[in-house]
Amino acid sequence: MLFSDMPYVRPDLEFLGEMIAEHVEELKSAQSFEEADRAFDALEKVFFSVDTAVNLCFIRHSVDTEDEYYSQEVDCLNEILPQLEEIRQWVYGALYASPFRPDFERKYGTLLFTNIGIRLRSFDPKLIPYMQEENKLTTAYGKLLASAQIPFEGQVLNLAQVGAYKESTDSAMRKKAWLAQADFYSEHQQELDGIYDKLTALRTKMGRELGYETYVPLGYDRMERNCYTEADVKKFRKAIIEYVVPVADRLYREQAKRLNVPYPLSYADTAPMFIFWPPAKSSTMSFPPRPRSSSTSCSKTSSWTSSPARARRAAATATICPTTGPPSSSPTSTAPRGTWRC
């Protein structure tokens, strides 16, 4: 199946919570590793289907941020995904505490549990509102950059299209492309700085909610940096200066010779390692037909996260299961629940 033909269905948070809870219960109550492994496999299939739907939505939105349907779906997923992370925690907890953990490690490796430990310590339900706001800000940042309409050489281009001219054989053209992009960033500096400032403050609060002085430790965990620490990164940066910079200096000197420009290179001459011209034409993608807009509102708080903790604990022993995937009809955000039932 071509990517453009893959149907999209918005994940149903409440239904997924019910399904995941069932599978987690199977995992917890398993009497043998084989039973536990079957429950784990069912969970993996559920999350695979969910992740597929989420990636379809975000990719199609990135291709055309003006698409009303996928823009609305991204807004909805920005609210849903942090709540889904809370549901995933039940799976992580059940696996981490499983009496069959040694068997899981033998089959899947110890890295599985290293990463689970990181995911468990880097999440708390009180972070959900912060994560939702973080998603909104990063989406706003992406939309702002994608909105660029830059007059250039008799055309109206986006940032990426202008960027292609940074590798022109003409140094003056390369400089012109750099300045055209710079003008866009300067024009929107206040908006970009505002988003960055809000994200920095927001993430600092997230780190402090988990007991850290800054966001850095939480940031490392959220990126699953499982084999090196902040101290290791400092050593790495020092090694870059000592070992990589001299090599880079030699390479840039060779680049200057190839381009027949003076060294040190100007900003307009750093991009073209080699000259390939003209730039490749951008392609367009088409997707299956979909509704003009979603008829299902996206609630900020699902019945899953708003239900009493006791009810959630009881439910936290199962899994979701779009193992067969959504129907092959036109994508819709209002598909019947049964289309995702195993």
Image (cartoon, grey):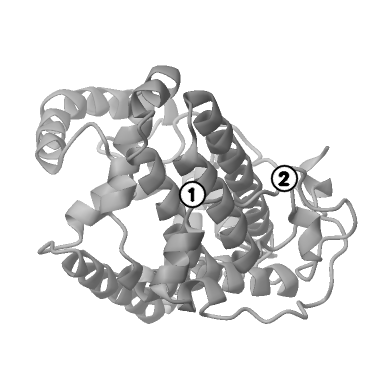
Q: Secondary structure at mark 2?
A: loop
Q: Which residue is nearer to you in this view: 134 or 153?
A: 134
Q: Is residue 106 above or below residue 253?
A: above
Residue ID at (63%, 36%): 277
Label 2 or label 1, whichever comes before in sequence order: 1
Location of residue 182 in the rendering, given as x and y in whole percent from the top left corner: 42, 65
Image mark count: 2
Identify which amino acid the numbered label 2 is placed on. Answer: Lys
Q: CA distance from mark 2 to mark 1?
A: 17 Å
Q: Secondary structure at mark 1?
A: helix
Identify which amino acid the numbered label 1 is placed on. Answer: Arg
Residue ID at (75%, 68%): 333
Left or right: 292 as drawn, with respect to 179: right
Residue ID at (46%, 36%): 272
| Image quadrant in which you'd find residue 286 | bottom right
Bin the neighbour count of mark 1 within 10 Å (Cα to Cα): few under 14, some 14-19, many 20 and up. Answer: many
Q: Which residue is mark 1?
A: 174
Left or right: 89 as drawn, with respect to 121: right
Location of residue 14 in the rendering, given as x and y in whole percent from the top left corner: 61, 68
Q: Is residue 286 above or below residue 105?
A: below
Q: Which residue is nearer to you in this view: 158 or 86?
A: 86
Left or right: 165 as drawn, with respect to 226: right
Bin the neighbour count of mark 2 within 10 Å (Cα to Cα): few under 14, some 14-19, many 20 and up. Answer: few
Location of residue 172 in the rendering, given as x and y in whole percent from the top left corner: 48, 50
Q: Which residue is mark 2?
A: 281
Pick out the residue farthest to the front. 31
Q: Quadrant of the N terminus?
A: top right
Of marks 2 and 1, the one in the foreground:
2
Q: Which disc number belongs to residue 241?
A: none
